[in-house]
Amino acid sequence: MSSVVDTIKEQIASNSILLYMKGTPKFPQCGFSSQAAQALMACGEKFAFVNILENPEIRAELPKYANWPTFPQLWVNGELVGGCDIIVEMSQSGELEPLIKQAAASAEG
């Protein structure tokens, strides 16, 4: 039987752009998740997400695995980019879109 950490690793490995969030991009359940999802959607690429409210074991284990205590968490190409503040800052500075487009392009490759 695989552990929760194995599940997390599998999710991160199989999705080049992955957002762990509360709720879904269309129906976020917290302001921070909403801002993060909107910033990602503005990049115009598809991304995977995990609703941690429906996955309490992931919600419990991911902060330990990631060494990042809060949600949302954006993972791109297997690396933790950060949470809401970082995502929004990168979006405003123009850094987020090229990162997301590059990850999306490499996933299609």
Image (tube, rainbow, N blue to C red):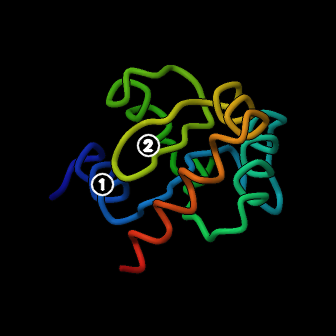
Q: Position of residue 38 (x, y in %)?
A: 80, 51
| Circle 2 Cα neighbour tier, 10 Å, few/some/many (<14 / 14–19 / ≥20) | some
The residue lying at 37 percent from left, 53 percent from top is 77
Q: Is residue 37 above or below residue 104?
A: above
47 sits to left or right of 60: right
The residue lying at 28 percent from left, 58 percent from top is 10
**Which residue occupies the extreme left position in the image?**
1
Q: CA distance from mark 2 to mark 1?
A: 8 Å
- Could you say whether the residue bearing mark 1 is in a helix, strand or loop? helix
Instruction: State which quarter of the image contains the N terminus.
Output: bottom left
Nearest to the observer: residue 21 or residue 86: 86
Q: Position of residue 17 (x, y in %)?
A: 50, 58
| Circle 1 Cα neighbour tier, 10 Å, few/some/many (<14 / 14–19 / ≥20) | few
- Could you say whether the residue bearing mark 2 is in a helix, strand or loop? helix
Amino acid identity at mark 1: Thr
71 sits to left or right of 1: right
Give me the disc on residue 64. none
Nearest to the observer: residue 2 or residue 27: 27
Instruction: State which quarter of the image contains the C terminus.
Output: bottom left
Q: Are marks 2 and 1 in contact (CB under 8 Å)?
A: yes
Q: Dot 1 corresponds to which residue?
A: 7
Amino acid identity at mark 2: Ile
Q: Between disc 2 and disc 1, whose residue precedes?
A: 1
Nearest to the observer: residue 52 or residue 45: 45
Give me the disc on residue 58. 2
56 sits to left or right of 46: left
**Which residue occupies the extreme bottom position in the image?**
108
The residue lying at 70 percent from left, 53 percent from top is 40
